[in-house]
Amino acid sequence: VTKSDDVYAASGFDGCASNREVGWHLSSDHPDYFPWRGNVSAYDWVPPKSCDDMQNDFRESLVVDLVERGGWLLIGDSVTEQHFFSISCTLYPHIIATPDYSKSWDWDRAWPQHLHLNPDS
């Protein structure tokens, strides 16, 4: 990782649906973090064979599961916010996050955030 945008590929993401404090969430907002972020992203977690659903096309199968079996409601604090952000990266580009923080930074941090299916996906 040598620049902020490198963190997506290093983490196995195509991007993130949520655009709230991306640099902070991905620890890519300061050049001093780049070597550390690269080392963290180099870790390759391989799920056991019993988790066959996670072997291939995980992001697509999770989207299908959420559509067919219902969604999730996440209520909590900053740790929950990080989980929400991570889910938005895992499921991207199949989902869209709201509100769109790139349009205005006047949003209250306490306002709910949502993930919706991307009709173009």
Image (tube, rainbow, N blue to C red):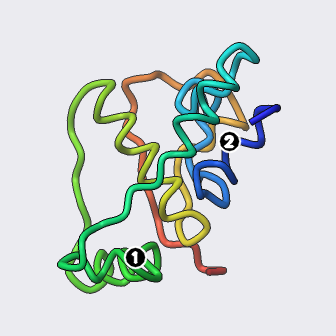
Q: Nearer the viewer, residue 22 or 50?
A: 50
Compared with 63, 7 (above or below) is above
Work out which quarter of the rendered image holds the C terminus and state it: bottom right
Q: Residue at x 70, y 25 (%)?
A: 34
> What residue does disc 1 label?
63
The residue type indicated by label 2 comes to: Val
| Picture coordinates of residue 2, whole percent (x, y) | 81, 32
Compared with 32, 118 (above or below) is below
Compared with 13, 85 (above or below) is above
* Location of residue 22 (image quadrant): top right
Q: Residue at x 62, y 40 (%)?
A: 19
> What residue does disc 2 label?
7
In the displayed structure image, the side of residue 63 where residue 7 appears, left or right: right
Q: Residue at x 48, y 46 (%)?
A: 43
Q: Earlier in the sequence, mark 2 or mark 1?
A: 2
Name the mark on residue 34.
Answer: none
Q: Nearer the viewer, residue 7 or 78?
A: 7
* Location of residue 76 (image quadrant): top left
